[in-house]
Amino acid sequence: MKSSSILHKLLVSHRPKVSALALAIGVLTSLTFLPVSHADAATSPADPDKVLKWVFNVAETGFDPGAAKDLYSNGVNYVIFETLYSYDYLASPVKLIPRVAESMPEVSADAKTYTIKIKKGIFFTPDEAFKGKKRELTAADYVYTLKRLMDPKLSSPHSWLIAGKIVGLDALAAQAKKTNKFDYDAKIPGLEVVDKYTLRIHLNEPDFNLGLILAHNPTGAVAREVIEKYQDIQGQVMSNPVGTGPYMLVPDEWVRGSKIILVANPDYRGDVWNHQGSSPEDQKIMAAMKGKRMPQIGRIEINVMIEDQSRWLAFQGGEVDIFELEGPLAPQALDNGKLKPALQKKGILLSRIPDPELTVYYWNMQDPVWGGLTKDKIALRRAVAMAHNVTEEINIVYNGNAVPLDYPIPPGVVGHDPNYKSSIQYNPAAANMLLDKFGYKKGPDGFRTLPDGKPLEIRYTARTGPIGKLQTEVWKKTYDSIGIRMKEDLVQFSEMLKAEKNCQLQTRNAPWIADYPDGDNFMQLFYGPNTGSTNNGCVKIPEYDALYVQSQKLPPGAERDALYHKMARIMEVNTAQRTGFARYRNMLAQPRVIGYKKHPIIYGEWMFFDVEKNK
């Protein structure tokens, strides 16, 4: 089944004036947009002759903000489904701004109650579920969306965002597990609809990151009628995205795993570009974009190209407008992090940022070989962690296009400590001695057995494609250096994520790009109750979990940082994971692209920049 009434005639309705009342939450402030007059609204800002050609390096999983876990699908979700808040396009450090909300939230003195007013006159794109009527976005839609994240039937990978936080919501979810039915009509104290356009959220404990969470894709509003129409048909919710955002999917042109087409939403309210930056690059963008009504791009064509060389050739041939230059291809275009002169002469632009990211090496703590907190299991994991040369991996797999990390909170994220030194450092000789001491004996073939004499073989998983292949080669060298057999396991990205969520993988490189720019978003990766969602290594260490609960009650600052240091040391002592690196993200843009800059948090910045018309 497909969403009905896909409209190609690009019109835009009046957008009311947005308040710029700001709430000081750390460094986060609001942004003022220029109002759009009725006269201006007569002509759509989105031009159907402006076509952006984009590329994904892995296949999408689908377009349901509550279920999609991968970065690429959520880039599409960002422009279809609208969150209450978002981020300014140019501000550094990042600034939280209203999106659907009229202004920043009113927060009670105890930081446990948030009151949010949403803009009037915002409508979902047409769908059969609405039975021919225009469907306005209301506060109740955000209540439904937040409840849905906790519905056991959905089993959302994002439930951790609000689990334990909203008064009465966890009890409602627990009841649903018993009855096998989530009661969406049940009123709970934590989610209060004050009036049609006002939402009040009551928290169990203070949460200083709630505004950031309400800017994250999974909280983008969905319509209950749409979900209920399609949810009983396998995969149909993922295939029928109906939101209020600037773009919408064209189902008839969607070829799964190959091609995704988005067109501008003709009823999107639009706004006037008025972002402020400080760098020379920002000044050029501001000069080119200031005062334009957005979005400008009428059609977005996304092709899935898994092979690095295919993407590079397509970009060189002008078949792709913006291209993510991953590590293996970096030498083709970059010299010491700068664009090569030949490409500069062609007018190619480079937007390069260190990602707010952590790539962590984990060992499945529920796996019979790797899991457990006994000394022999800790020794096995620690030996592998010490045997792995992170710098060598960065050079071989990413051509030096990454930064090694000692601390689990990366640069550019609140809570990062540049002076922290991990107790786990590269030392293969000590790694071999450790395995010898704890009974992992080498046989005549040079490979080790388990302490009980049974064979020891591990399965390292990576995504299909050149990077995954290089990763397995580097890790094979690591395991060979300490006499452990390693089996290569290359699988499709989406299948790997499914297996990981169910604690079925043994070990892999697991990258995590910030959902929101706060250290909490990284320390939660190792919190026991997040197993099955974000805790990829299925780690459950009671001491760590207790400290994490304490940390959530604190605002950013020295007291919380002290807890984070203790938590990092606990992870090192038990070696449930090994901190790896943060990659640079290099985005190349053709000369016809106007005003593009990679944002550190938003993926799918298509509503913020422009392209020249197709010739």
Image (cartoon, rainbow, N blue to C red):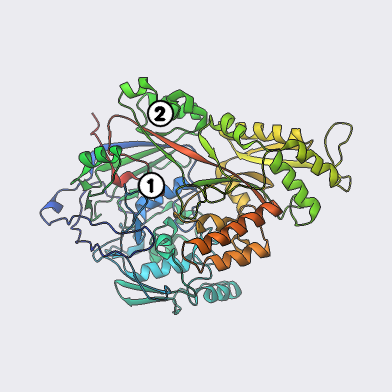
State the residue at coordinates (42%, 72%).
Answer: 111
Measured along the vertical axis of the image, is residue 55 above or below residue 32? Answer: above
Mark 1 neighbour density, 10 Å: few (under 14) some (14–19) many (20 or more): some
Mark 2 neighbour density, 10 Å: few (under 14) some (14–19) many (20 or more): some
CA separation, marks 2 and 1? 39 Å
Quarter of the picture containing the C terminus is: top left
The amino acid sitting under disc 1 is: Pro
Measured along the vertical axis of the image, is residue 183 above or below residue 284? Answer: below
Q: Would you say residue 174 is visible in this rendering? A: yes
Element type at mark 2 = strand
Q: Residue 576: image x %, image y %?
A: 68, 52
In the rendered structure, find residue 251 and report the number of the disc placed on it. 1
| Tag 2 residue | 338
Q: Residue 263: image x %, image y %?
A: 30, 45
The residue lying toward the viewer, choosing from 555 and 83, is 555
In the rendered structure, find residue 19 and report the number of the disc placed on it. none
Q: Earlier in the sequence, mark 2 or mark 1?
A: 1
The outermost residue toward the top is: 342
Element type at mark 1 = helix
State the residue at coordinates (77%, 48%).
Answer: 379
State the residue at coordinates (47%, 38%).
Answer: 584
Q: Residue 249: image x %, image y %?
A: 36, 48
The residue lying toward the viewer, choosing from 148 and 224, is 148
